[in-house]
């Protein structure tokens, strides 16, 4: 099964009742086809999602979901890094010896989490499900 076939949208019960036909130049068609392929969508689905966006340049819902899923993975990794850094800090507190890279690592982690939060807000500021856990 091809990648495109695996991503196929489920059919609407009873079928879609409305059909849209339009004509375009070969050049425009090829450009749209390439963009649809890059987005992982069929050309009709690409046109529908593009037309339903609130603002030009806004991501489609599929793109938002795709990025949110990947950023969830990033969040998990950042949490694990934080746990490891906390363990390093615990050892440093018990031995009295501070690893020279610890301060830089903590600074990096704080900056990464801040950037992560900014990206999530840009994707969908109204979705509380994809907020970093406190």
Image (cartoon, grey):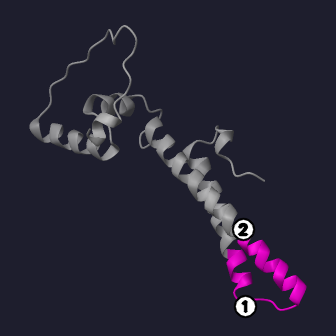
SS class, disc 2: helix
Instruction: Please tell me the numbered disc located at residue 82.
Output: 2
Task: State which region is magenta.
Answer: 84-107
Q: Quick check: is 90 in the magenta stretch?
A: yes
Q: Residues within 10 Å of mark 1 (few under 14, many from 20)?
A: few
Is 76 or 37 nearer to us in this picture?
76
Instruction: Please tell me which of labels 2 and 1 falls first in the chain.
Output: 2
Q: Is residue 67 left or right of residue 28?
A: right
Compared with residue 127, is residue 90 higher up or lower down, i.e. above or below? below
Residue under label 1:
100
| Residue 119: x %, y % from top left | 57, 54
**Residue 97, image quadrant:** bottom right
- Report the residue at 30% width, 42% height from top: 3
Q: Is residue 119 left or right of residue 132?
A: left
**Residue 49, image quadrant:** top left
- Report the residue at 74% width, 67% height from top: 83
Question: What secondary structure do most residues of the magenta stretch adopt?
Answer: helix
């Amino acid at each position: 099964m091809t990648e495109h076939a695996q991503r196929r949208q489920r059919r609407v019960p009873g079928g879609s009742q409305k059909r849209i036909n339009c004509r375009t130049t070969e050049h425009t068609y090829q450009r749209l086809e390439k963009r649809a392929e890059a987005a992982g969508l069929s050309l009709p689905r690409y046109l529908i999602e593009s037309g339903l966006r609130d603002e030009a340049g806004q991501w489609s819902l599929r793109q938002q979901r795709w990025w949110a899923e990947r950023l969830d993975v990033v969040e998990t990794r950042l949490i694990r890094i934080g746990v490891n850094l906390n363990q390093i800090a615990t050892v440093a507190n018990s031995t009295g010896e501070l690893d020279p890279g610890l301060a830089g690592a903590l600074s990096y982690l704080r900056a990464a989490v801040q950037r992560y939060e900014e990206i999530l807000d840009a994707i969908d500021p109204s979705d509380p499900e994809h907020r970093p856990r406190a």
